[in-house]
């Protein structure tokens, strides 16, 4: 048996399609394009509906995470600045591991980026 195959799924390039027709694995550049265009035109919303209406065979959670952590235009990439670092340390001392609350004070940064820092 091919090691890339999972029980109940078919191998399709990088992703897997399970018996229900859902793709698994990394989103392709084409899927990213569909997601970007859909959100640009319709906005964010109920992510299960976004996934279905954008023509993606993905669940809503994977679309939401891809958008929030990678595709969102205002997403800030690159190193944390010294100012951001001091703010993170101050807010962490005050609020603990409440990464989403801390992220609200750092426009363009995600809770995932801050937690990983």
Image (cartoon, grey):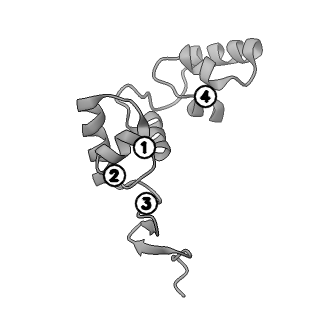
Marks 3 & 1, CB-CB < 8 Å contact: no
Numbered circle sitting on residue 114 = 4
Position of 67 relative to 26 (above/below): above
* Nearer-N-terminus badge (3/2): 3
The local crowd at label 4, few if under 14, some if 14 to 19, many if 20 or more residues have their Cα within 10 Å, is some
Image quarter in which the N terminus is found: bottom right
The local crowd at label 1, few if under 14, some if 14 to 19, many if 20 or more residues have their Cα within 10 Å, is many
Marks 3 & 2, CB-CB < 8 Å contact: no
Marks 2 & 1, CB-CB < 8 Å contact: yes
The local crowd at label 2, few if under 14, some if 14 to 19, many if 20 or more residues have their Cα within 10 Å, is some
Q: Which residue is mark 3?
A: 22
Marks 2 & 4, CB-CB < 8 Å contact: no
* Nearer-N-terminus badge (4/3): 3
Q: Which residue is mark 1?
A: 63
Tell which residue pokes out farthest to the bottom in this image.
Answer: 1
Helix, strand or loop at mark 2: loop
Mark 2 to mark 4 CA distance (whole Å): 29 Å
The local crowd at label 3, few if under 14, some if 14 to 19, many if 20 or more residues have their Cα within 10 Å, is some
Residue drawn at (57%, 32%) of the image? 113
């Amino acid at each position: 048996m091919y090691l890339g195959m999972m029980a109940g799924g078919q191998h399709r390039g990088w992703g897997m399609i399970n018996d229900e027709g859902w793709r698994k694995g990394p989103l392709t550049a084409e899927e990213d394009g569909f997601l970007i265009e859909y959100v640009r035109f319709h906005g964010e919303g109920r992510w299960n509906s976004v996934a279905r209406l954008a023509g993606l065979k993905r669940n809503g959670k994977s679309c939401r995470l891809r958008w929030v952590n990678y595709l969102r235009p205002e997403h800030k990439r690159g190193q944390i600045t010294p100012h951001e670092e001091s703010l993170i340390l101050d807010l962490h001392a005050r609020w603990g591991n409440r990464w989403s609350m801390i992220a609200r004070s750092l426009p363009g940064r995600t809770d995932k980026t801050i937690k990983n820092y």
